[in-house]
Amino acid sequence: MAIHTQGVAEETRCDIIHSIYDLGKKGQPAVDFLLLALKDEDKRVKIAAANALCDIGDARCVDALIALLSDGDKDIRFVSASLLGKIGDPRAREPLTRACADENCFVRIMAKEALHRIR
């Protein structure tokens, strides 16, 4: 009898992502956990945590999102640029300006749009 652990692992990941969205509804008390979730290897977890932090509006999320502009995954960089534009914090201007030269065209476009929102 074979045990299929990949399906269980995938279900667990989905549960984690749903939990992160629920944590976003808790507000300020969830911020520390969500900041830790940004360091997860699974980009879906990172994206869920980034969105939840943006929804909460904690000032610490800006620095964390700026750091994600250097992530190795283009999707993470894209989401980070998008959320920084949504937040509109002036601290993101310089990092977003650098992201306008990103190797990925979608990240470049989003960084330019985010800068436009901040100005």
Image (cartoon, rainbow, N blue to C red):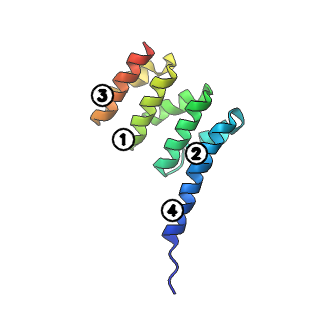
Report if the CB atoms under discs 2 and 3 are less than 8 Å apart: no
Report if the CB atoms under discs 1 and 2 are less than 8 Å apart: no
Toward the right, the furthest residue is 29
The crowd level at tag 4 (other Cα within 10 Å; few <14, some 14-19, many 20+) is: few
Mark 2 residue type: Ala
> Residue at label 1?
74
Q: Is 113 positioned to the left or the right of 44 in the image?
A: left
Mark 3 residue type: Ala
Percent x, y for residue 67? 49, 33
Report if the CB atoms under discs 3 and 1 are less than 8 Å apart: no
What is the number of the mark on residue 10? 4
The crowd level at tag 2 (other Cα within 10 Å; few <14, some 14-19, many 20+) is: many
**N-term mark: 4 or 2:** 4
> Residue at label 3?
101
Q: Is 25 positioned to the left or the right of 119 in the image?
A: right
Nearest the eye: 111 or 12: 12
Q: Is residue 19 visible?
A: yes
Percent x, y for residue 40? 53, 49
Nearest the eye: 77 or 94: 77
Q: CA distance from mark 2 to mark 3?
A: 27 Å
Q: Is 99 positioned to the left or the right of 14 in the image?
A: left
> Residue at label 2?
37
The residue lying at 65 percent from left, 42 percent from top is 23
Report if the CB atoms under discs 4 and 3 are less than 8 Å apart: no
Q: CA distance from mark 1 to mark 2?
A: 18 Å
User: Disc 3 on helix, strand or loop?
Assistant: loop
Quadrant location, the C terminus: top left
Percent x, y for residue 28? 69, 32
Mark 4 residue type: Glu
Q: Is residue 71 visible?
A: no
**N-term mark: 2 or 3:** 2
Q: CA distance from mark 4 to mark 3?
A: 35 Å
